[in-house]
Amino acid sequence: MNDNRLGTAVSPYLRLHADNPVDWREWGPDAFAEARERDVPVLVSIGYATCHWCHVMARESFSDPEIAELLRQDFVAVKVDREERPDVDASTMAAAAAFTEQLGWPLTAFMTPQAHVFFAGTYSPPTPVGQHPSFRQVLGAVLDAWRDRRDEVEANAAALAAAIRQGAVDASDGGVAGRDGAAPVLPSVDAIHQVVRAVGQGEDPVYGGFGGAPKFPSAPLLEFLADAGADGDPAAAALCGRSLRVIAASELTDPDGGVFRYATRRDWSVPHYERMLYDNAGLLAIAPPGQARGIADFLRDTLRRSDGAFVAAQDSESTIDGRRVEGEWYRRPVAERVHLDPPPLDDQVLTGWNGLAIRGLAIAGARHGDDDMIALARAAADAVVDAHLRDAHVVVRSSTPRGVSSAPPTIEDVGLFAEGLLELALVTGQVRYAVTARALVDDGLSGSLRSDPVLATAGTATGEQPQTALRSGTIALASAACTIGTLTGDDQYRAAAVELVGDRARAGIDRPLGHADALGLALAMQRPSRQVVVVATDPGALRAAAVASRRPGTLVVVVTPTQAAEWAAAGFELLASRDQLDPAAYVCHDRVCALPARSVDDLTRQLASV
């Protein structure tokens, strides 16, 4: 009997498994209640819709009727989309690290009915390969342990859960105040700049980028280098520039402008062909004009829905000549692709990932004078606000044309979307985006986000883990709080930001790859605070000069006189009494402003004086 329950799932990844003979369940209390009733372990399989090796394992193992029958008899099988449920993925990854250093997807974990992991691994082949057992052998070993050494299994699982719980508590305590109760402290500017030297030592001197194979674009790390470069570190600027150029010129970048997830070889060749919204959105914020335009074209032409929102990814595989193959569509000349079915899309709209795209498009559009990018950002913002927010609060993390996911919003959704809306508000002068962002920041700082009930009961909710490919929602929330504090004059927002970023930034001194975004924000928070307010019906060259002055610690906002009055009325004191002159540019330090500059030359002289 097939009791697969994924047919009505919202997640595209779960729906890919709806025809498996495996009796899959979605993550939730019901699955674990069933495991307790039957006294069997829970198999939790985590992946995502564009994951190549997830596809492979599905074809090799989860489509096998004999394996499906074994799972039906002796397990409760749960399928999880790591994009839909990053909280479940983070908790399971933390536990899986005790069993393997090769973390990734598909992630296969075995849990007790109390949702405590007692064994985990990644991809398992259908037959043994060297020292790597087959999936069937893994299942057999797990069952043997469950049946014959139950006390040991449950004791080890409980100990691992306790370690995860303590790690989450330590991280939380360190972020709000030092463990001795002292106020949080940011690493010094000198210490942050020293990290650039350490990062530079990891540069590949032959092919560029960092380390050996595989090679990732690592957008948060590159943005940190760009920030350090803008703060006066020429080595950081050069390192970032070299990395961006090699990525743009390599096989990692498709001719249509989109960037693949990673290259499997040290020389940036043989990409892993899936294309994620977050990689491309992250690179947009720092890419030079041609590269940024190519990425924006990819977002517009491939990942954008008709309502303006962006979907999560494009698959690595496509069907050509009746066969499902990885990368073949991308290896064809662009002119030939139009006659073939393209790789499918992971069609879920994620609030946080759209926030990252809005941020990247707004920053790149302002920097490069590209109004099309800003228009794309506005359309995405409006679409997500309409569909995923209610009364300026995020109520939906993920949606697809088939409906709204029940997965709760996370700090990623609140932080990244708030930061994206603020960048868009600063560029367009539309105060409604800033008002919504302020409400989101207040939400995020209030601690109102709820934990998954299964993880909460198990005591294994880890919170957001260090990020390497995706900007941290925690850091984005801190960044947005800083911006709101500067705009309103309310210093409590900055204090809250220090609490959020302090522990992560200190950890980044020794582990910059996972905390690069925290280092960048900590740098900005310690540089001289400068605000540049351009008020003009036709900002033109004034806007260009102001945007060019952007560096860590500098905030630039461009408004018309009417918009300035609207911002002031909404409580953004930096814009108070700025609606009297047109055009005018105000250069302010800690919100104390010099006499207005009425020309580009005047503005340039004021900017150059500090």
Image: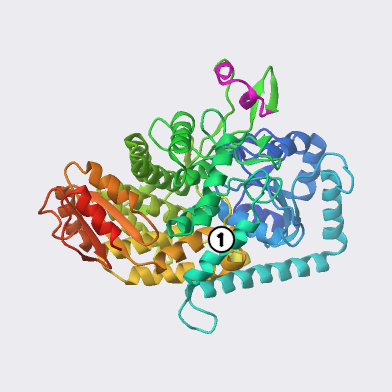
Number of residues whose C-alpha sits closer than 10 Å to that of mark 1, classed few (under 14), some (14–19) or many (20 or more): many
Residue 131 image offset from top left, x and y in percent = 89, 49
- The colour style of the image is rainbow
Q: Residue at x 59, y 28 (%)?
A: 343
Q: Nearer the viewer, residue 142 or 378?
A: 378
Q: Confirm whether residue 432 shows in the render.
A: yes
Residue, disc 1: 196
Horizontal side of residue 522 vs 314, given as left or right: left
Q: Could you tell me which quadrant the C terminus lies in?
A: bottom left
Residue 5 image offset from top left, x and y in percent = 63, 40
Q: Nearer the viewer, residue 521 or 132?
A: 521
Query: Mark 1 is on which residue type?
Result: Val
Q: Confirm whether residue 454 shows in the render.
A: no
Magenta-tinted stretch: 326-337
Horizontal side of residue 348 vs 29, given as left or right: left
Main SS, magenta region, reads helix
For residue 544, which quarter of the picture? top left
Q: Nearer the viewer, residue 555 or 173?
A: 555
Q: Nearer the viewer, residue 43 or 543?
A: 543
Residue 379 image offset from top left, x and y in percent = 34, 37
Q: Could you tell me which quadrant the N terminus lies in?
A: top right
Q: Residue at x 33, y 66 (%)?
A: 529
- Counting the numbered discs, the total is 1
**434 vs 265: above or below:** below
Horizontal side of residue 333 vs 264, given as left or right: left
Residue 93 image offset from top left, x and y in percent = 66, 57
Does the magenta segment cover residue 197? no
Judging from the image, what secondary structure is the residue with disc 1 in? helix
